[in-house]
Image (cartoon, grey):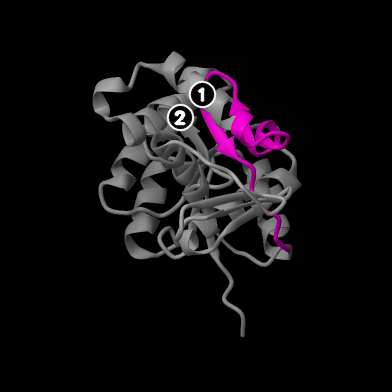
Amino acid sequence: MQHRSLILVVDDEPQIHRFLAPALGASGFDVLRADTGAEALRLLAGRAPDLLLLDLGLPDLDGHEVLARLRAFSQVPVIVLSARDQEREKIAALDGGADDYVEKPFGLGELLARIRSALRNRTGAEAVETPYRALGLEIDPRTQSVRLDGAAITLSRREHALLDLLVRNAGRVLTHRQLLTAVWGPAHTEDVAYLRVYVRQLRRRLDPVGSQVILTEAGIGYRLKEMPPDA
């Protein structure tokens, strides 16, 4: 029997649970419900969900606090669902350990795609062994080779490091701070203009598909286009 991933939905809006429980169930997931942050933390301590959908506006604890407490003992993938659309809220959630951020109201198709991506990324090191393929582009993390329509593309060491990080997190948004810290080090967390220059160069190297695979999350960071399931 195929394993059904368990998703914990943490939200104080009954209509969200009424919508998501049957929709996720019909898509092959088991669903666990929590209406408060405290209830979510109790469930997380006793159960092992495969993914958490977390609202930020909870009645007892702010979602950011729930995320901080969770990350002290678990690396379960977290997708934030929130009506808070300010860039600083998204950046704070992603820098605080969330894997993704989906604004309310959201479409079910988009949410399911984000869930599948987060669950795939959970395997981390295993996933990176699989070459990334999309739009004629093939990136093999094992050999650090990059090809477009079969033709080899030469990248600098820093470009390789940036692209490798995006490949390891394909489908997931990475903030400017996360990318700068990982590729350039903690002394460069504010050098966003520098990062933009490298992303622009990397896209040019991957022309004509560079801008189609390296996607901009305005004011937040970048996301590598999720690899098609049949790639």
Mark 2 neighbour density, 10 Å: few (under 14) some (14–19) many (20 or more): many
Q: What residue did someone put label 1 on?
A: 220
* Circle 1 crowding by C-alpha within 10 Å: few under 14, some 14–19, many from 20: some
Q: Nearer the viewer, residue 171 or 136?
A: 136
Residue 132, position as x, y percentages in the image = 59, 55
Question: Cβ–Cβ below 8 Å for labels 1 and 2?
Answer: yes
Looking at the image, which is closer to me, 58 or 63? 63
Q: Magenta region: which residues?
A: 204-231
Three-letter code for the amino acid on which mark 2 is drawn:
Thr
Tell me which residue sits at (67%, 31%) in the image: 211
Whichever of callouts 1 and 2 sits on the residue coming sooner in the sequence is 2
Which sits in the foreground, 106 or 22?
Answer: 106
* Rendered view: 34 above or below 143: above
**Residue 50 visible to the viewer:** no
Is 54 covered by the magenta stretch? no
**The N terminus lies in quadrant:** bottom right
Q: Residue at x 53, y 41 (%)?
A: 154
- State the residue position of label 2: 175
Q: Amino acid at mark 1?
A: Ile
Residue 205 inside the magenta-drawn segment? yes
The circle drawn on residue 157 is none
Residue displayed at 62% across by 50% down: 147
Q: Position of residue 161 (x, y in %)?
A: 41, 40
